[in-house]
């Protein structure tokens, strides 16, 4: 569908928050779902839409918000678009996170921009889930500060250089806070997700991961985003995911091709 950009601002060095007008169907999306986005006027480079997790559902504004880091041609072009510009958006797509279990503590574990699909989870639970947010420096986490204030989220921050919060990673912070019986929802670099899977086996908690992969169509037709499943069959990240129970994926095969 064609949507209008409502705002597109740099929330931290290199990190942008894009708000676009949304239909009722898009606003009914689940936390963890994503959209495919392409700016009008991009001609043939880049040719394909780009996938982005839905960061916030702004129902009062009839809008959704996307968080992205300007690192490639598509995201750099996106960062130059202004309020009022037209954009092509397809979604919501993918399965999204399952409902958080009642009576069990939930930890949302994020590495850098991997926090994108997790903020809407925290928003859906009214701030009762705890977010563990990690980055290399304060710049990699500071865009979450306004969400923490608006949503009342309990957040543990960790930076590798110690510039804010605990010195370390989101994984080292999670080790201090996770307990058997917890449910962990995670998104971030592949190395981080492997650690979540390993620790879930060792410590006895349930984990779901939002798996990030390059995508072509975003609807399961092109098989350009497959990952090996635990049963030996390829899983389409866009259609069968992007959220997987960690036990659904073959982490050994994923390690082999990383």
Image: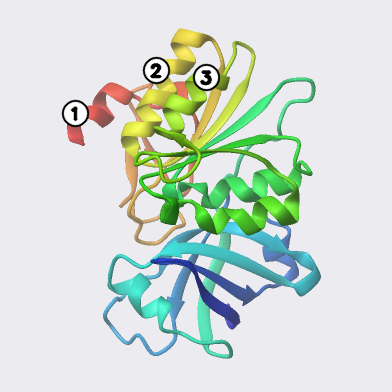
Pointer 1 local density, CA inside 10 Å: few below 14, some 14–19, many at least 20: few
> What residue is shown with label 1?
256
Residue drawn at the location 36% of the way across and 45% of the way down: 136
Q: Is the residue 161 above or below the residue 74 in the image?
A: above
Nearest the viewer among 183 and 16 is 16
Give the spatial CA distance, label 3 vs label 1: 29 Å
> What residue is shown with label 3?
176
Q: Earlier in the sequence, mark 3 or mark 1?
A: 3
For the question of whether residue 102 can be seen, the reply is: yes
Left/right of residue 14 with respect to residue 8 in the rendered view? left
Pointer 3 local density, CA inside 10 Å: few below 14, some 14–19, many at least 20: few
Q: What colouring does the structure picture have? A: rainbow
Rendering coords of residue 122 (x, y %): 68, 44
Nearest the viewer among 46 and 15 is 15
Residue drawn at the location 67% of the way across and 50% of the way down: 148
Q: Residue furthest front?
A: 163
Q: Quadrant of residue 42?
A: bottom left
Q: Earlier in the sequence, mark 1 or mark 2?
A: 2
Q: Is the residue 28 above or below the residue 227 in the image?
A: below
Residue 198, labelled with which disc? 2
Mark 1 or 2, closer to the camera: 2
Kindly check if marks 2 and 3 are in contact, taking CB atoms under 8 A apart as contact.
no
Rendering coords of residue 2 (x, y %): 57, 82
Residue drawn at the location 38% of the way across and 49% of the way down: 137
Check the picture and name the quadrant holding the C terminus. top left
Mark 2 or 3, closer to the camera: 3
Rendering coords of residue 151 (x, y %): 74, 51
């Amino acid at each position: 569908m064609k949507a209008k950009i409502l705002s597109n601002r740099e929330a931290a060095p290199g990190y942008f928050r894009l708000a676009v007008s949304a239909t009722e169907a898009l606003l009914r999306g689940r936390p963890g779902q994503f959209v495919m986005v392409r700016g009008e006027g991009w001609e043939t480079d880049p040719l394909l839409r780009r996938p982005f997790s839905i960061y916030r559902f702004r129902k009062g504004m009839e809008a959704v918000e996307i968080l992205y880091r300007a690192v490639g041609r598509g995201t750099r072009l996106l960062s130059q678009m202004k309020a009022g510009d037209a954009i092509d958006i397809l979604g919501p797509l993918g399965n999204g996170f399952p409902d958080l279990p009642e009576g069990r503590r939930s930890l949302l574990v994020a590495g850098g921009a991997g926090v994108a699909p997790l903020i809407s989870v925290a928003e859906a639970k009214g701030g009762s889930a705890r977010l563990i947010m990690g980055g290399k420096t304060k710049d990699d986490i500071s865009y979450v500060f306004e969400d923490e204030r608006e949503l009342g989220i309990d957040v543990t921050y960790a930076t590798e250089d110690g510039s804010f919060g605990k010195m370390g990673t989101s994984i080292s912070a999670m080790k201090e806070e996770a307990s058997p019986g917890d449910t962990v929802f995670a998104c971030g670099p592949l190395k981080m997700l492997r650690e979540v899977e390993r620790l879930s086996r060792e410590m006895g908690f349930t984990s779901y991961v939002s798996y990030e992969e390059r995508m072509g169509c975003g609807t399961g037709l092109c098989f350009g985003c497959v990952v090996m499943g635990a049963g030996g069959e390829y899983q389409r990240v866009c259609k069968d995911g992007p959220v997987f129970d960690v036990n659904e994926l073959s982490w050994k095969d994923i390690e082999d091709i990383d």
